[in-house]
Amino acid sequence: MNANAQRWRAHAGPADPALADAGAASARQLFIDKEVTVTDTPSNALRISDVSKHFASEQAEGGVLQVLAGIDLDIPAGRFVSIVGASGCGKSTLLRLVLGLDDAYEGEIRLDGRRLHGTGPERGIVFQDHRLFPWLTVAQNVEVGLRNAPLTKAEKRELVAEHIALVGLQGFEASYPHQISGGMAQRVAIARGLVNRPRVLLLDEPFGALDALTRSRLQIELQRIWEREGITMLLVTHDVEEAVFLGDEVVVMQPHPGRIRRIVDVDLPHPRNRSDPRFIALRDDVMSDFLDPAVAGSDTARAPVHARIPLGLADVRMAW
Ligand SMILES: Nc1ncnc2c1ncn2[C@@H]1O[C@H](COP(=O)(O)OP(=O)(O)OP(=O)(O)O)[C@@H](O)[C@H]1O
């Protein structure tokens, strides 16, 4: 990899800390989002402090709907954090705030000590629907993630090829989205989210639209990528088993307004064995929260999400 591409990697948070040191000064100068201000010493963490969010809403009392209340999360670099909670408890809203799509909130969000405003290349996103451009090939869709990167065409090609390999899609570079499966399209979306080498990858129900087998394969793939790349990951999911399979910790939210009920540490080595009694116990522990109406919520417009309920009702499927 040439010097410019190395510097780009260094900017965004390289797997190799030596690259970060080598490129840090120029990276800050070149790539730090102009809207990001350094007001703190770097802490190598995503820090969400006392974040609350309100929306104007005609349906809400007083015309204002509080969606998030006092969210505090301190996420060390390289950690995998899963967020679960009933539909409507504000999970996607929280991700949007971290991504910088919406700056109208109370509290603050910092990354490596820098207060975040607006979007920036140090944060990548993968949505439930892959959002690929149908008129672009797999390689071109991944390259979209580098659209603002000050790299040459050849450097971009190099990074794109590297990330297509990372998600196991060599040979499909020239395919169009309609020529690949849903699981492959989601791999492309992951490659696009990672191609900038972000410090944090935000994942909003990334496997929610996939069949169970593909979903389980991609969970294993994502875990492998996370271990290899060492990127902080913040995953929103309705699937408690997925949350426990991937997360170092599982944040359980409850609605009205959305807040953190508790954080469960998943102190099991990766890759996790879903039939390990300790895994099952943790999964069931998190699931048991959803038997509490305060967590399950009463949103009538709920998405049809499912989970297995423990307490002798194994495999009973409940929508919340
Ligand atoms: N732009 C908006 N204006 C008004 N209300 C909004 C807006 N965006 C979201 N909301 C409301 O905020 C609440 C939280 O929505 P959000 O999508 O963050 O929940 P969620 O936990 O991600 O739900 P799901 O699991 O179904 O995706 C919902 O009641 C939603 O209707």
Image (tube, rainbow, N blue to C red):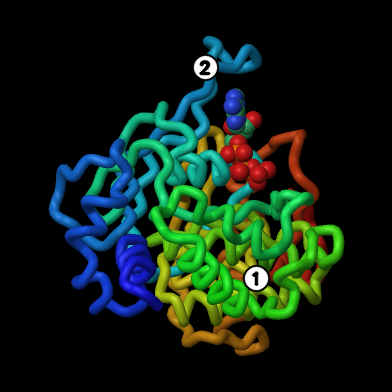
Name the side, left or right, on which 234 lies relative to 37. Answer: right
Give the amino acid type for the residue marked by disc 2 in the picture: Val
Q: Quadrant of residue 16?
A: bottom left
Which residue lies at the image location 60% right of the left edge and 56% below the top edge? Answer: 126
Which residue carries the number 1 mark? Answer: 241
Task: Give coordinates of residue 218: x percent, y percent.
Answer: 68, 74
The correct choice, above or below, for 157 with respect to 299 in the image is below
Q: Nearer the viewer, residue 54 or 220?
A: 220
Q: Is residue 81 above or below residue 110?
A: below
Between residues 123 and 296, which one lies in front from this camera angle?
A: 123
Confirm whether residue 245 shows in the render: no
The quarter of the image holding the N terminus is bottom left
Identify the residue position indicated by label 2 in the image. 64
Q: Would you say the beta carbon of the disc 2 residue lies within 8 angstroms of ligand 1?
A: no
Reply above or below: 218 against 192.
Answer: below
**How many other residues sit within 10 Å of disc 2, few (<14), some (14-19) or many (≥20)?**
few
Q: Residue furthest right?
A: 179
The residue positioned 49% from the left and 43% from the top of the image is 94
CB of mark 1 within 8 Å of CB of mark 2?
A: no
Helix, strand or loop for disc 2? strand
Mark 1 Cα within 10 Å, few/some/many (few <14, many 20+)? many
The type of residue carrying mark 1 is: Glu
